Image (spheres, rainbow, N blue to C red):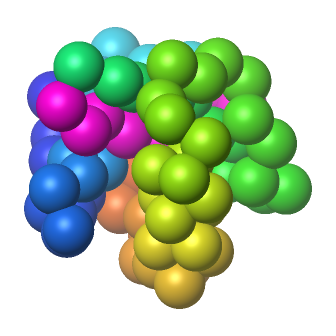
Amino acid sequence: MPTLLLQDGFKFFFYANEHEPKHIHVMKNEGFAKIELEHLKVVQNYLKPKDLKIALAIIEQHKDEFERKWNEWFN
């Protein structure tokens, strides 16, 4: 499970056996979410609304880096 970023109590990662479309998992405390990278689409969410908003902002800031790491891992 490659960890992409630890920031502000969030853990951003993907699993080693992932599938398309490119997406990121994020965890904070007991909550988690799954976000598609291309359009920052929330596929699954169990984060508090405030935490989801923060997580999406962080993903947007690091989107290019996350996509690059995804491509390196799976290609």
Is 7 left, or right, of 37 in this rendering? Answer: left
Q: Residue at x 48, y 31 (%)?
A: 47
- Whole-percent x and y of residue 71? 47, 55
- Could you tell whether 15 is left or right of 36 in the image? left
Magenta stretch: give its range.
Answer: 20-29
Residue ID at (54%, 53%):
50
Relative height, residue 64 to residue 74 (above, below): below
Place of residue 6 in the rendered image (x, y in percent of width and height, measured from the top left):
14, 62
Q: Nearer the viewer, residue 47 or 16?
A: 47
Q: Which of the 4 image quarters holds residue 7?
A: bottom left
Is 17 on the left or on the right of 16, as rendered?
right
Say above or below: 61 vs 44.
Answer: below
41 over 17 or under it: above or below? below
Residue at the far bottom in the pictured view = 61
* Residue 69 locus on image (x, y percent): 35, 62
- 62 on left or right of 12: right
Which residue lies at the image location 67% right of the left edge and 52% below the top edge? 37
Residue 27 lies in the magenta stretch: yes
The answer to whether residue 45 is seen in the rendering is yes
The image quadrant where one finds the N terminus is top left
In the image, residue 28 lies in the stretch drawn in magenta: yes
> How far across and down, in percent of the image, does residue 44 sit?
64, 18
* Main secondary structure type of the part rendered in magenta: strand
Number of marks in picture: 0
Query: Which residue does the image show at 25% across and 38% down from the upper left?
Result: 28
Whether residue 75 is visible, yes or no, is no
Nearer to me, 42 or 52:
52
